């Protein structure tokens, strides 16, 4: 069975790429999908995130905190680097592995539920159920109960 | 800044996340440094040689971004 991407999911995928580009990432990663869901109002997935206090800015802050903490774990302080004034990437970022895996998980979840359309909620579940990586670490660090959040997202599908 | 020794994370998750963060930092640092070099008048072949990559690679990766930022014209603060 093949699940079709709904219009709102295509918007999330497109927005994730724009967010990655804006953040000067050479690749679109799972965290950009998460930010895209958080930044596109009007979906149940967005409502669950906002209801949990996870708006775009809070998620972005959590990701930055994770970035800084991971650098400091090997003795590097981000504050020592002057990265200002860098021109935004003009190149369109390519799809990174973590985003591909999240979308594959999303499709499998939609498939298992026999949902005909793949909606942002499936994408969000695909991101939240990653066993490891930047998103789980950032959310854990921010004190988010990923399991509880996943249940809420699934219930709102 | 590292003090006496570079700490090596005990937890594998922390260690692997540090690798991811370092790659990301390297990308951002490369963008900033290439831009700085070009603003200072370095040529593409010089920047490429300094980075240890081909001229084509560095051009493909950074040219459009820097042209869009007006680097080749005059300094423009963003």
Image: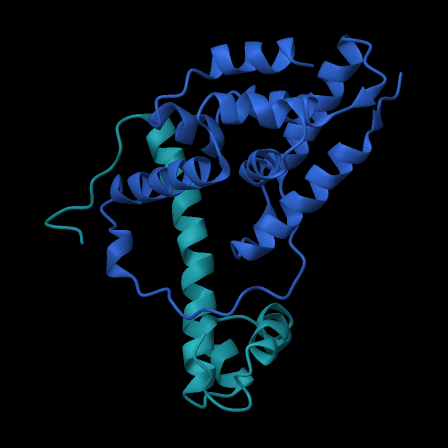
Q: Is residue A86 left or right of residue A19?
A: left
Q: Nearer the viewer, residue A50 or A77?
A: A50
Q: Residue at 83% of width from left, 22% of height from top? A: A117
Query: Dividing the image into 4 quarters, which one contains the C terminus of chain A?
Result: top right
Q: Residue at x 45, y 66 (%)?
A: B30
Q: Colour of chain A?
A: blue
Q: Would residue A78 be visible to someone looking at this image? A: yes
Q: Is residue B48 above or below residue A124?
A: below
| Residue B52 image point, x, y percent | 49, 71
In the rendered picture, chain B carries what hue? cyan
Q: Position of residue B29 (x, y in %)?
A: 40, 63
Nearest the camera: B5 or B27? B27
Q: Residue at x 60, y 80 (%)?
A: B67
| Quadrant in which residue A96 is drawn | top right
Residue drawn at (54%, 70%) of the image: B53
Q: Residue furthest right?
A: A1
């Amino acid at each position: 069975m093949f699940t079709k991407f709904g219009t709102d999911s295509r918007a999330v995928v497109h927005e994730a790429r724009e967010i990655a580009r804006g953040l000067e990432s050479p690749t679109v990663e799972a965290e950009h999908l998460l930010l895209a869901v958080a930044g596109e109002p009007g979906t149940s997935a967005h409502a669950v995130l906002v209801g949990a206090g996870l708006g775009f800015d809070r998620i972005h802050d959590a990701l930055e905190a994770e970035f800084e903490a991971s650098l400091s774990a090997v003795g590097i302080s981000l504050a020592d680097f002057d990265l200002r004034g860098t021109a935004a990437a003009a190149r369109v970022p390519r799809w990174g592995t973590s985003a591909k895996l999240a979308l594959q998980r999303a499709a499998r979840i939609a498939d298992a539920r026999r949902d005909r359309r793949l909606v942002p909620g499936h994408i969000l579940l695909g991101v939240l159920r990653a066993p490891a990586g930047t998103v789980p670490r950032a959310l854990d660090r921010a004190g988010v109960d990923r399991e509880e959040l996943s249940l809420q997202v699934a219930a709102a599908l | 800044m590292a003090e006496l020794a570079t700490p090596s994370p005990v937890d594998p998750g922390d260690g692997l996340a540090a690798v991811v963060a370092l790659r990301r930092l390297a990308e951002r640092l490369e963008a900033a440094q290439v831009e700085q070099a070009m603003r200072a008048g370095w040529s593409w072949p010089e920047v490429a040689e300094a980075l240890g990559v081909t001229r084509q690679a560095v051009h493909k990766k950074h040219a459009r971004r820097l042209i869009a930022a007006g680097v080749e014209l005059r300094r423009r603060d963003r």
